[in-house]
Image (cartoon, coloured by chain):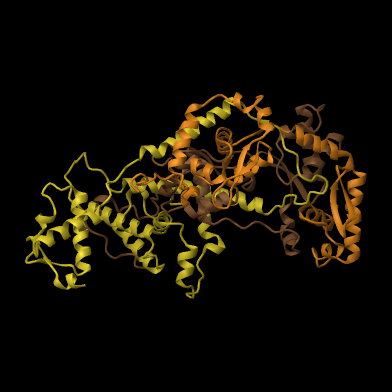
Chain colours: A yellow, B orange, C brown
Amino acid sequence: MVVAGGGLMTAPQAVLPASGDYDATFIVDVGTYNGPLDLLLTLIRDERVDIDDIPIARICEQFLRKMHELALNDAAEYLEMAARLLRIKALMLLPRHEGDEAWEDPRAELVRRLLEYQQMREVVDLLERRGEDRRNRFARSWFPTITAPPQAPLALSLAELLVAVDRVLRNVRQPGLHEVVPRALDVDGAIAIVRAVLALRAQARWRDVVRADAEPWEVLSALLALLELARRNELKLTQHQPFSDVEIRRELAGEAA
Amino acid sequence: MNSLAKLLEAALFASARPIPTDDLATLDSDASPAAVHAALEELREHYNVDGHGVELVEQGGGWQILTRPEYTEAIERAQLAARPHRLSGAALETLAIIAYRQPIGRAEIAEIRGVDVGAILKSLLERGLVEVTARGEGLGRPLLYGTTPLFLEQFALRHLEELPRVDELTIALRPQAAAAGASHLNAAEEAAAPEPAASAA
Amino acid sequence: MNSLAKLLEAALFASARPIPTDDLATLDSDASPAAVHAALEELREHYNVDGHGVELVEQGGGWQILTRPEYTEAIERAQLAARPHRLSGAALETLAIIAYRQPIGRAEIAEIRGVDVGAILKSLLERGLVEVTARGEGLGRPLLYGTTPLFLEQFALRHLEELPRVDELTIALRPQAAAAGASHLNAAEEAAAPEPAASAA
């Protein structure tokens, strides 16, 4: 037996028009498929292959073709699935030794998800039938005699209120757990240091403006300060070759400005 | 009943308003006005003779099925006696916050709970458990809520001071709210996102 | 019909939502639960045998009078009532997952469906089919969702247990399609030789 046909996909409004005159927005928007798992499951059903032994190369190729056909190339979720399929395909091609007990089928996780998804689709079929049945019956919508229905009494104890208090407290404390106080950058301070150094001499080096034991935030601040001052034409940065020391030269134009 | 009468019954039941005879006639294009009248008469007869809890009446510019007056009282009484209603967890939490922090505004409650509380506040107001007790200072002078005498009655309390003291709550909530007091725009957002760098600012 | 049946009919006619059996019992304090059941049965029989445009059904946690499906089209065409919109496949999938795994968070639903469900959750909340029932433990204390009584009502379910148990679902994928003839494509073969660009239908 193969995958049961999803009622949804065969529902009239979910099917692509037979003619080729649909546009891309229709496809992407309406989504013939409810996601990459849906598409994958449909391919497995259409190709009539064994879920426990998916010919991954073939299915992967079909998947990519369908993505292209349906202009789903920009849909992150489909791209992610395509990448996953390609990875599995690659893993399947790795040589493995005879009787290798430790070998784990790279398809296992995907199969588990597909089965879970398929189960859910069965429920969807049931909900769809029941929902359609109910949709075809009207309930009363006219309330001639009884206006605003009076309220039923409340079942509410003090204990319940206090339990709620406890819940609130636990929720409120949560943000405290993430309290991280990042060290703010001090670009202004770094600018002052650079200017002070350049006031003394026309040319300096990276090490002159950043201590050897500087913390990351100080290094970043200095870097931003240098870039900022360069932008303002107060100095000129040069590096003669990659990884060599950076030269900082006072810019005369900047002084004049 | 004949099939036209059954169709009319279904339509009268489902409609949100009394249906004029002309509109009833559009239900079945094959039916003559006389047939519609005959079917309505059959339906009325059926309800009357057979002994039903409802009847067919012509009023308000159309036809409608109404419950018989003799049952109205029992139905209203039953609604009062209906099973006691339970508050949802979310409503309880909101009520707890208001009880301990009153007067308090909607935005502040939302901030503590991490979700918008508009609908819940409305139902608590309708139930008479909370009421607007003041207006806040800030922007737009927000409504501030507090508990009602009915709230006290519900818990058999004489006054609010009789509420068990939850020092933790008042203490925990106050500074937290004060720190986050800038009342961020994301109050209504789903996850109570950690406040980044609040103190670094 | 006996007088209790008539009273129940009047109450059921007046209500747009299903009425739980317990609530129906409060309509007449003298009536035993057995009598209420008998009266409901009589009412149901009456509608079925006598030929009515409406019928009595038990679903959505209670009893409800609904129009018979065969009249829906005519009523809608005459614009006397409108059917609600059909839910999208994506919304149904999300509902199915919530129904089985409640309380469940957004991330977990997305994991099962393979796509993000933020917008769908919002619309299901707005439609009153799901609600926030709890908050999860982990990071950010995510909101957890569950189905509402309206969900049962709109899917003609008496209660959640009416849905098939997970182990009752057939998992149609599992039993192998020997007939499909594709089964020779086992893992080893495939590893040995990459698929030819076959089935380029």
Residue at left offset 55%, top offset 28%: A162
Towards the viewer: A82 or B157:
B157
Residue at left offset 56%, top offset 24%: B164
Where residue C160 appears, x then y in whole percent? Answer: 58, 39
Q: Is residue B162 above or below residue B23?
A: above
- In the visual, does C26 lie left or right of A32? right
Q: Is residue A45 above or below residue B155?
A: below
The answer to which image quadrant residue A104 occupies is top left
- In the visual, does C103 lie left or right of B27? left
The answer to which image quadrant residue C130 occupies is top right
Where residue A35 appears, x then y in whole percent? Answer: 43, 57
Can I make out residue C172 in this image?
A: no
Q: How many marks?
A: 0
Can I make out residue A196 in this image?
A: yes
Where residue A218 appears, x then y in whole percent? Answer: 19, 51
Where residue A41 appears, x then y in whole percent? Answer: 41, 54
Residue at left offset 51%, top offset 53%: C120
Towards the viewer: C121 or A99:
C121
**Direction bottom: furthest residue:** A21
The answer to which image quadrant residue B163 occupies is top right
Towards the viewer: A150 or A89:
A150
Residue at left offset 82%, top offset 64%: B23
